[in-house]
Amino acid sequence: KLTKILFSRKNTRNKTPTVGYFLDNKKNKIDQVVMTVYKSPKSYTGEDMLEISCHGSIAVINKINEILILNKIRPADPGEFTKRALLNDKLNLIQAETINDLVNAETDNQRKVAVGNLTGKLDIFVEKVSKKISKLLADIEAIIDFSDDELPAELFKKIKEQKKNICFQIKKAIEKSELTKKIHSGFDITLIGKPNTGKSSFINYINNKEISIVTNIPGTTTDLVSSSLDINGNKYTFVDTAGIRKHKNKIEKIGIERSLESAKKSDLCLIFLRNNERNKYIDIKNKIFVKSKYDKNKKKTPGAQNISNMSGYGIKSLLKKIEKNLRKKDLGETM
């Protein structure tokens, strides 16, 4: 019905793109567009759908929207098309959630995980495990229903092996899902250390812009400053923190407390050293020691990643080590 009112071409076929003019109610031409009709049930939502491909100017889009609203066509709510597809059994719940992940993907690995689930990897895994559990339950019911002399001698052993195998598969899936969660949300990396050890300069260097204030005055950073980067397809959020030292006022004390709290919650800590104060950070589990200002002293500190925030020396190597530390398993396959 809508194509007859607002489209210059009257003969449109199902799933066949048709070039013509989009018209207003007075038959004035608005734009040359491509219209594609998708008739129920062979559409994304399972309902009748009409797709309009127009030129991308704001004036054209706004005018088309205005005309559609005048013809009692309302804008879709966020996620409404996928919701309708779910309600009409065109998608299952996992696929619907995956589409949301795909739309909101910020990095290439987030996209890969979402596409993997959309193409059915998770569904296949769930179906396989469900079948194995059903078989296990059937064998257990057989033990209950029949006497020992009527059952195969190896049945008890077989049931134990089945259970062990299922538990192993589920455990591995959970481990991979934890990794997938981090791919989706990103990895948090806290920079911690004494004042003036190069934390803020490092944040500014990797972002190629001034994120944190850098001065020679100790205690410049008094609160958490975060910055997210896409590095080789993964999202990393670097958190610059207040320098760890004896606080001189209440504000600095709060900043240091937040620094230590952020370090506890992070996936990884970069500990910037001034001298050789490693023993002060024994309680921090997942850490990499960093010694900056290599451009000034030209002396390497053993057991630390030596970098220069001025020349960039050692920073690529540090980023590779961060990636290796956090990517302990292959991210390409999630199930």
Image (spheres, rainbow, N blue to C red):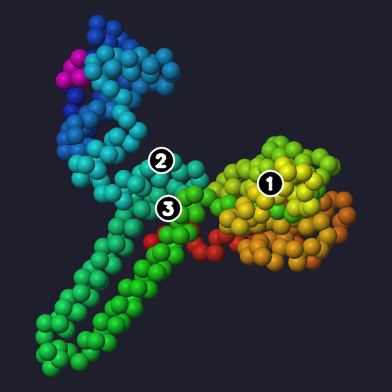
- Local packing at callout 3 (Cα closer than 10 Å; few below 14, some 14-19, many 20+) is many
Q: In which quarter of the image is the C terminus?
A: bottom left
Q: Give the spatial CA distance, label 3 vs label 1.
A: 39 Å
The quadrant where residue 68 appears: top left
Between disc 3 and disc 1, the foreground one is: 1
- Could you tell which of marks 2 and 3 lies nearer the N-terminus? 2
- Residue 38: x and y in percent read 21, 32
Residue picked out by circle 1:
254
Question: Residue 124, how many percent across, how many down?
Answer: 29, 60
Q: Which residue is drawn at 78% across and 53% down?
A: 245
Q: Spatial distance from mark 2 to mark 3, Cα to Cα?
A: 12 Å
Q: Residue 172 carries which label?
A: none
Vertically, is 43 above or below 240? above
The residue carrying mark 2 is 103
- As measured in the structure, the alpha-carbon distance from the residue carrying label 1 to the one carrying label 2 is 38 Å
What's the residue type where badge 1 is placed?
A: Ile
Label 1, residues with CA under 10 Å away: few <14, some 14-19, many ≥20: some
Check disc 3 and give the amino acid type.
Answer: Val
Q: Which residue bears the numbered disc 3?
A: 113
Q: Neighbour class for label 2 at 10 Å: few (<14), some, many (≥20)?
A: few
The magenta segment: 1-5
State yes or no: residue 4 in magenta: yes
Most distant residue in the right direction: 297
